[in-house]
Amino acid sequence: MKFILALCAFAASAAAFAPAATPSVARTQLYMANHLELTTGKAQLDHSVVDRFNELPYPADKVLAEYVWVDAKGETRSKTRTLPATRAKAVDTLPRWNFDGSSTGQAPGDDSEVILRPCRIFRDPFRPRNDGLDNILVMCDTYTPAGEPLPTNTRAIAAKAFEGREDEEVWFGLEQEFTLFNLDQRTPLGWPKNGFPNRPQGPYYCSVGPENSFGRAITDATYRACLYAGIEISGTNGEVMPGQQEYQVGPCVGIDAGDQLFMSRYILQRICEEFQVYCTFHPKPIVDGDWNGAGMHTNVSTKAMREEGGLEVIKKAIYKLAAKHQEHIAVYGTGNELRLTGKHETASIDQFSFGVANRGASVRIGRDTESEGKGYFEDRRPSSNADPYLVTGKIMATIMVS
């Protein structure tokens, strides 16, 4: 017994001088391994570790610039560079940059350099600082080294539609719907695995409660981050299908609507990284059953539409949209035929229609617009994955035809 007590005492005294690195490292490795697992709703890394480095101060004369662009599939990509703070104050002083276009489907391997031209600056909500400077997000479009816009540069296409029409003061409000999935990319948030909710659509739209609302934290985080960035995000709500959410961007003037909407998508996807949730903009992610699709309803108002007699201007614009219905459908997103069926608050993809307060029409006029005789109209045809540059540019080109 004395031997055992002595041995215990010796072990206790030895432990006081023994290095703690080995068990600590083992625990840390195990802890980190758990965080690196693909688990929906959990951060990929331990933020207590990440924050140790985020707390390091930035140099007083430098900022980080995240250059964001649209790839061949219409998705956002980005990379970071360090810039003198004096060059990050305006788009005109930002340097152009380049990337490997062969890795994004935008250039061949034997001539892969693609030029990034800065177009719009936003504050970076992922790298905030408190020294009076801002790290920045930079929306860019893409060019060949010879200065020609790439075929995938839809911003350049839209710019031609808006050029010389600044006096029209065209406002756009874009309603971005999206669907959140578990990391298996098969199960929407709030759905049972390999099954369907036990209740039909109805209780989920603008809902509250853990049995109804799925993904609110992601939408709220996107809301705050977009406000911080300087995006004109004007609201959010839960959508009709469980796991589906929406936010609205606008009103924005002209081509700036496309810049802001694409940057908001980038921010949303970055936030989904943090939450380890898969986000899709597919217009009909669930084709089986009685479930709504996802769109990017586009609200439009010119200066003349907002003035007295504007309702007649709106109707004339709608007639022009009707005459080019199939041209618009061609640029209003991929997979839209699965969504525009005439059901689930959509019109048929094959037939143009419009009405007052009718969410089953191609284009809707709001009750307020009808009663006041001026205002805006809503084009309900664009899908959630539609390119906002193509959508706004096409609408502009169509309604401005004499």
Image (cartoon, helix red, strand yellow):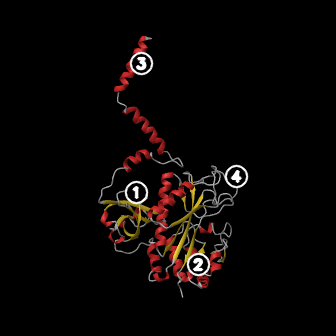
Q: What kind of residue is marked 4?
A: Asn
Q: What kind of residue is marked 2?
A: Gly
Instruction: Identify the mark at residue 198; answer none if there is no mark.
Output: 4
Q: Residues within 10 Å of mark 2 (few under 14, many from 20)?
A: many
Q: What kind of residue is marked 1?
A: Pro
The Cα–Cα distance between marks 2 and 3, rounded to whole angstroms, is 84 Å
The spot of residue 115 in percent (x, y) is: 36, 68
The spot of residue 398 in percent (x, y) is: 54, 81
Q: Earlier in the sequence, mark 1 or mark 3?
A: 3
The Cα–Cα distance between marks 1 and 4, rounded to whole angstroms, is 43 Å
Looking at the rendered image, the quarter that the N terminus falls into is top left
The Cα–Cα distance between marks 2 and 4, rounded to whole angstroms, is 41 Å
Looking at the rendered image, the quarter that the C terminus falls into is bottom right
Instruction: Identify the mark at residue 8; answer none if there is no mark.
Output: 3
Based on the displayed image, in which of its 4 quarters is residue 318 positioned? bottom right
Mark 2, residue position = 375
Q: Kindly identify the residue that appears in the image at 43 percent across and 59 percent down.
A: 125
Q: Earlier in the sequence, mark 2 or mark 4?
A: 4
